[in-house]
Image: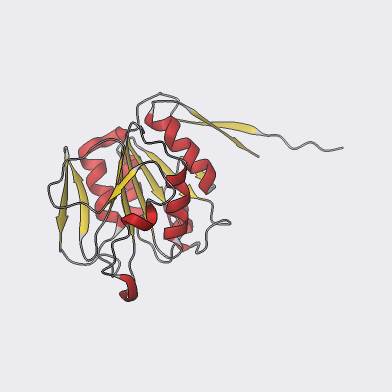
Amino acid sequence: MQYTRHVSVWINPEKIARDVIVVGASAGGIRAVTKILSWLPADLEAFIGIVIHRGDAGSKANWSDVLGMKTDLRVVEPGDRDVLTRGVAYVAPSDCHMRFERGCIALDDGPKEHRMRPAADPLFNSAALAYGPRVVGVVLTGGGHDGMKGLLGIATGGGVSLVQKPSEADHASMPEYAIAHVRVSAELTIDEIGGALVQLARGGAVQIASA
């Protein structure tokens, strides 16, 4: 009889408070992000930035109400220079790149990246630059390559890099590309990501069982 050996992998064994969370998604992203947010308590000890690619049909819609339906967190589309506050999830508005600076949000209408505005890479890279090892980057379902360069910047800066398991994603291109080019901290299901973010924000180590 053969036995499968399971090895435990630890995320954040240093027990650093990872209290800056950035999330990027494209096709299938509204459902995935909504499910992650449902895991997060109102008193989450972190602030969150969310970029979901927008198609022409819904490009002007305010998505904060939809994404906030199943979470106790406050979910908003911010204005330029809004102060970053723990327990709040900030959704990038239509036709704006959103960046995290020290203590506040910056919005701009700079050139599209990956043919998108907003795009995930500007948010990820700015968070890595401003907050270093405090950052958790999450790449979710979507087509294309957005999020990979930013996730690499987060990993290089000592942050945590999480990717949705491609087998679970509605569209696997974004997570697969990130996995191929970044030494990610872990590939997780949506439910695992939600639970991990709560622990990481508190400075906890997260144990992941892998075959």
Does 187 sit left or right of 72 as displayed? Answer: right
Residue 46 can be seen in this image: yes
Q: Is residue 92 above or below residue 126?
A: below
Q: Is residue 113 above or below residue 91?
A: below
Residue 146, x across and y down, in percent = 35, 60
Image quarter hosting the C terminus: top right
Does 191 sit left or right of 25 as displayed? Answer: right
Residue 186 can be seen in this image: no
Residue 66, x across and y down, in percent = 38, 57
Residue 70, x across and y down, in percent = 44, 49
Q: Is residue 115 above or below residue 194?
A: below
Q: Coloring scheme of the render?
A: secondary structure
Q: Name which residue lies at 16% across and 52% down.
A: 79
Residue placed most toward the observer, 207 or 62: 62
Q: Name which residue lies at 24% across and 59% down.
A: 93
Q: How many marks?
A: 0
Q: Name which residue lies at 53% across and 44% down.
A: 191
Residue 141, x across and y down, in percent = 46, 59
In which image quadrant can residue 200 be found?
top left
Q: Name which residue lies at 31% across and 75% down.
A: 56
Image quarter hosting the N terminus: top right
- Most extreme residue toward the left, as rendered? 81
- Most extreme residue toward the right, as rendered? 1
Does 10 sit left or right of 57 as displayed? Answer: right
